[in-house]
Image (tube, coloured by chain):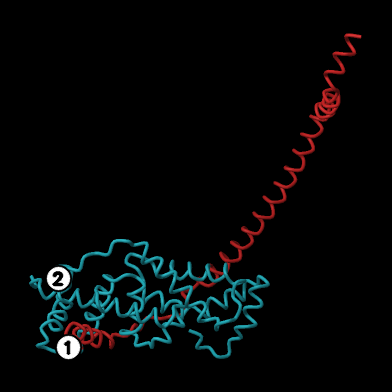
Amino acid sequence: MAEDESFDLAGCLDLVRKRDQAAARALVEHLHPLVIRIVRAHLPRRSSEEDLAQDIFLKMFTRLEQYQGAVPFPHWVSRIAVTTCIDQLRAQKRRPEFRWADLSENEADVLDAVLTNENDVEAGDALAARELVHKLLDQLKPDDRLVIQLLDLEQKTIAEISVSSGWSQSLVKVRAFRARRKLQKLFQELEQKERP
Amino acid sequence: MNPSDQKWSRLVAAARPAQDTRDTAAPYGFATRVAALAMAQERLSGSLLERFSLRALGLASLLALVCVAANISTVTSLFHEEAALSDDPVAEVLDLAS
């Protein structure tokens, strides 16, 4: 996000409200890293990250008059990004069933190592492990998925998730609990199924 | 910790080192396109509202005036008829008899 400390966000927002197109362009460039990270972390299947980022920015401009400054502007934008991604994930409706047959060789090896507890997951399999994590996360409800991803994969705190999502801390905890329970069930089901 | 939780933790710990190293800067032309779309969208919605609401108001006023003008004779005659009907019918019959 806003790594550029010299960027005058308040001044830029004033100009955007006066319909200054150059300021609007600068604002998009400034916030793009923040938005694209959220989009990439929660991108639904078969969706274009650029299209989703564009939707988020257009929503931001449309709702700009509603921004009262109660939270820092990047937090306000990240909430728009999070809710837009969740809406997109909800629109997918059906979550594909998680099957051994759909995993690549590396992903199946990683899952095998995790399930049997016999071997450690090799350091070189990080990418396969990440893909596998995302496939498991696809099985969760969008809200629960978002919480567990931020909490476990990105190691954010409950308070940070609450700020970026706009949900209360107790709601974040409930969603994390629900997501963990669903993951437990998934692991139990996978253990019962034989690796082909 | 629950064994399934341990499995999830091991998997996530293995996945964490795979950092997303892709560039996060906006692609060339993205900011220009989005800014132009946003400004055009606001202008379009504002002008549509203005245009339609003002036109609808003008049209409604004109229709109201035309309706009143077209029916002015009917309205006045109704007032006269009402005045005639308000006379006492018994008195009228007695008047005829005398």
Q: Image check: B97 left or right of A135?
A: right
Tell me the residue at 20%/78% (across/down): A184
Relative to the observer, which residue lies in front, A56 or A67?
A67
In the picture, which chain is cyan?
A
SS at circle 2: helix
Choose between A3 and A152: the one closer to the eye. A152
Residue B91: x, y in percent?
87, 18
Mark 2: few/some/many CA within 10 Å (<14, 14-19, 20+) = some
Which chain is assigned red? B
- Callout 1 crowding tier (Cα within 10 Å): few <14, some 14–19, many ≥20: few
Q: Residue at 73% of width from left, 43% of height from top?
A: B60
Viewer-closest of B42 and B87:
B87
Residue A122, numbered label? 1
Three-letter amino acid code at the position of disc 2? Trp
Q: Nearer the viewer, mark 1 or mark 2?
A: 2
Instruction: Mark 1 or mark 2: name the one nearer the start of the chain.
Output: 2
- Find the residue positioned furthest to the right: B98
Question: Disc 1 on helix, strand or loop?
Answer: loop
Q: Residue at x 41, y 79 (%)?
A: A37
Q: Which residue is mark 2?
A: A100
Tell me where residue A11 appears, x and y as whole percent: 65, 82
From the viewer's perspective, tell me whether residue B54 is left or right of residue A35.
right
